[in-house]
Amino acid sequence: MNSDLFPAMIAALPQPVMLVNHDGLVQAANPAAIELFGAQIAGAQIRAHLRQPGVAAMLDRVLAGRPEDSACFIAHTSSRETVWKVVARQAAPETFVLSLSDISDMEAAEAQRRDFVANVSHELRSPLTVLAGFVETLQGPAGDDPAARAEFLSIMAEQAARMSGLVADLLSLSRVEAVEKIRPRTPVLIDTVLKATLAALRPQIDAASVTVNFDIPDTLPEIPGDYDQLVQVFHNLIENGLKYGGSGGCIDITATHIPAMPGFDGAVLRVSIRDYGEGFDPIFIPRLTERFFRIDKARSRDSGGTGLGLAIVKHILSRHRGRLIIRSAPGEGSSFDAVLPCN
């Protein structure tokens, strides 16, 4: 291969590409490779810059005569970790082409998928174990004990409801993600959404002995949205307030029309769900919308939480080009604000 022609051919390629000889010395590198490794990469020993066992073994195999091979190389910087797929292909008897592709997003997506499957499996395993245990017990001596049978059936019903709630939230999350890139345009009145949500939650509000202070102006403009999804947003946020902030005795629901807010083109509606419960450390706020994340796992499960409510809220607001703002501090309650664009 003409060594003068090679740099010109690869200069326009977006990914780092290098020509390496049989001794492992870099004969040529394109601008992307120089940006990644520095100007000293030209003429350098490639093993000195790709110093990880998997890549070193791959280079040895290619230098020994294998026509093509690949390995992953992880580069660390002060701000992030980048995963590169390093591919080596023989270009001449004593020369091979080395290219690097950034697969960080693919690796992150795969890790997220694995975590999701593991979390769902874990969430379902516990109630299934309980159900299997009680079924086995009822098939044995407890089957003839009316008191034990009634107690066990009650617990089994609770666990079945827990699994049903989890499956419902998973299906809801799947539906939201399927249309997340399609922004809804139907005019919706927020006060109508909130009144319908409170009517549906009235039994839970009464059972929790919580006072709901509802302060929504009649003059709020319509916003483009999906009525059913917005009901789900405020159902989740108000229910969240009842479960974890109900100890404060009241919840404030307010809505404000704001002419301008950073990050939005034009006016927005800001709907705030404020409770006066225990609150939590603000350090947890960035993780609250992660799937299955719970600050207090035992309490969340006992209250029937699936760990998916705020993840669903985030995805619905994202579809509406909106934002969720969370504020809290120990002993000061919590505030969950849904910000929605008016146009």
Image: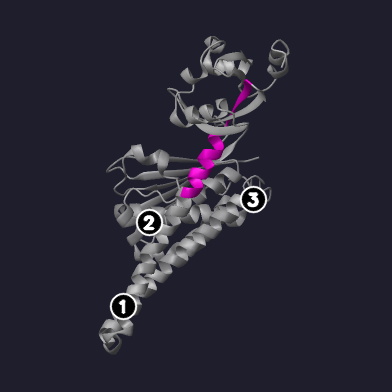
Q: Does the magenta stretch include residue 341?
A: no
Q: Which of the marked residues, 2 or 3, is nearer the chain's N terminus? A: 3
Mark 2 residue element: helix
The amino acid type found where label 3 is placed reads Val
**Mark 1 against mark 3, which lies toward the viewer?**
1
Q: What stretch is highlighted in magenta?
A: 94-114
Q: Does the magenta stretch include residue 112?
A: yes
Q: Name the residue carrying label 1.
A: 152
Mark 3 residue element: loop
Report the disc number at residue 179. 3
Report x, y in % for residue 88.
Answer: 60, 28
Report x, y in % for residue 19.
Answer: 62, 18
Q: Name the residue carrying label 2.
A: 242
- Spatial CA distance of label 1 from label 3 is 41 Å
Q: Residue 342 appears in which quarter of the rendering?
A: top right
Depth check: 77 or 334 in front? 77
- Spatial CA distance of label 2 from label 3 is 29 Å
The amino acid type found where label 1 is placed reads Phe
**Mark 1 against mark 2, which lies toward the viewer?**
1
How is the model colour-coded? Answer: one colour
Q: Residue at x 29, y 48 (%)?
A: 278
Q: How many marks?
A: 3
**Mark 2 against mark 3, which lies toward the viewer?**
3
Number of other residues with Cα within 10 Å of mark 2, as a class: few under 14, some 14 to 19, many 20 or more: many
- Quadrant containing the C terminus in the rendered view: top right
Mark 1 residue element: helix
Report x, y in % for residue 40.
Answer: 53, 9
Depth check: 229 or 6 in front? 6
